[in-house]
Amino acid sequence: MKSRTIATSQSIARKDTGPKLRGQCSKRVSILDAAANVFCREGFSGASIDEIAIEACVSRQTIYNHYREKETLFVAVIEDVMERANAALFSMLSTFPDKPDNLHQDLSDFAVRLTKNCLCNHDGKFLRRLVQMEGERYPHLFEGWRQHGPCKISSTLGALLAKLSHKGALRIDDFDLAARQFLALVNADLQMTYLFGGKPSDEELHSAASNAVATFLRAYAPLEQQASSQPAPLLMAVR
Amino acid sequence: MKSRTIATSQSIARKDTGPKLRGQCSKRVSILDAAANVFCREGFSGASIDEIAIEACVSRQTIYNHYREKETLFVAVIEDVMERANAALFSMLSTFPDKPDNLHQDLSDFAVRLTKNCLCNHDGKFLRRLVQMEGERYPHLFEGWRQHGPCKISSTLGALLAKLSHKGALRIDDFDLAARQFLALVNADLQMTYLFGGKPSDEELHSAASNAVATFLRAYAPLEQQASSQPAPLLMAVR
DNA sequence: TGTAAATTAGACACTATTGTCTAAAACGTC
DNA sequence: GACGTTTTAGACAATAGTGTCTAATTTACA
């Protein structure tokens, strides 16, 4: 059901334990997907292996064949989602506008891509919930994600902002701080939506991005560019 | 153990079911506190009544006397924490600087109070986790909190910013948006800390507030005031 | 088609948890 | 000190979940 790149699935499936997967790994994939859904919905202790088995259209025993016990499965799910999420993040960061034509428009579009494909999608929601729920129980597990996810996004985005700053398109002292604030501003209008678990509409994503970029540029654009960096006036207004 | 105002405890304790509480309600309070801790740590399904009973220094039967079943206790805990959290929020908003002497300093101090007493404290962490974990299972339960918590804080803060704007201390178009962005900026440097469940140090709170206010004022302060609204240069630098 | 691997359904022991029940003990108040 | 209430410990049935085992069935591939 859920989109999943073949490359990622196979790299995950080719792992330590369990059956030797002669050619096909569809069972593994559907177990991982089903388990991700159930763990996300119920939390670790609330999720039952039987429920996962039913949702994966697989017998309970097959799950135990592939993953020795519940916790092994949980760890595999986390690693799978983290890997996918970080890959998406990385590919998204590569679309950052380095030669912006219209700074406001280009940054807004980037922000929309980022929220839509990384922060507000299925995996993003899963990780927010799971880190919140089980982060303290498995600190080592999420450490890798933290390093290659949230921490990396700030520093990478900081470096990209630095480029724009050196070109004179922005006036920034602390690049990493500016990156964190950019992300925070983009999320400002989405926080409320996060709290339900609901997905924001495309319209909400666009207005959130536009609002964020407008404020970001008022704070960080050189004065002479302020006039040209305003958003199209009313189309993107909130609500 | 945890601080708790007497007024709130009693208003909560005087409720529908259970023993008639002749004079003392210490059992109810310690059950609620212990349950809050355990639910926060383990989630609803992970928490066991026995664990709560032990942590509350109370027999299991006593819990069933006061709260008919696990879910009743859970709902009571949520309502208790929500009520306390919203009260703290409301009292904190009343300390917003309406006649600011030094705008940067006063807004920073306000932000520190807000994060320290509402967002990063015990109840704030509890609600973030629980809404994330059980929000979809009990949408009606958290609706009240959402209305009187996050939604109210934005609109109230928006109104307070409007006052400052009308006095000429700020230049704001959309007050609610500015309020959401103010809060988002304050949280920008704390997001990472939230993800562990760890509490930020006082130093981190101060630097987060100062960074946020500096950017907020660059975006929203009238031009002629920009010079005077800079933070003390190096003391508050991040890390 | 034959073989080895993977999958399945079902039974199973074991543990943990919920919620009830009872009789004894502790408590507060008069 | 006597009374009624609350609390307690422990036993208890009922349920649900984990993880194992087995024997039968299906699948992949030569």
Image (cartoon, coloured by chain):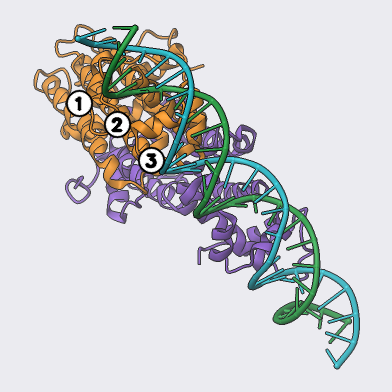
Chain colours: A purple, B orange, C cyan, D green
Residue B164 point in image, percent of width and height = 14, 19
Label 1 environment density (alpha carbons within 10 Å; few <14, some 14–19, many ≥20): many
CA–CA distance in space, label 3 to label 2? 11 Å
| Image coordinates for residue B191, horizontal then vertical, percent | 44, 30
Q: Residues within 10 Å of mark 2 (few under 14, many from 20)?
A: some
Judging from the image, mark 1 belongs to the subunit labelled B
Do callouts 1 and 2 point to residues on the same chain?
Answer: yes
Q: Position of residue A149 (x, y in %)?
A: 55, 39
Residue B195 percent across, percent down from the top left: 49, 32
Residue at the disc numbered 2 = B18
Along the polypeptide, which appears first: circle 1 or circle 2? 2
Inter-mark Cα distance, 3 to 1: 39 Å
What amino acid is at disc 3?
Answer: Glu
Give the vertical position of B211 relative to B106 (above or below).
Answer: below
The Cα atoms of the two marked residues, 1 and 2, are separated by: 40 Å
Compared across the picture, whether A155 is left or right of B31 comes to: right
Give the secondary structure at mark 2: loop
Above or below residue B48? Residue A116 is below
In the image shown, does B83 or A97 lie closer to the viewer? B83
Residue linked to disc 3? B69
Residue B157, numbered label: 1
Residue lying farthest to the left in this orientation: B166
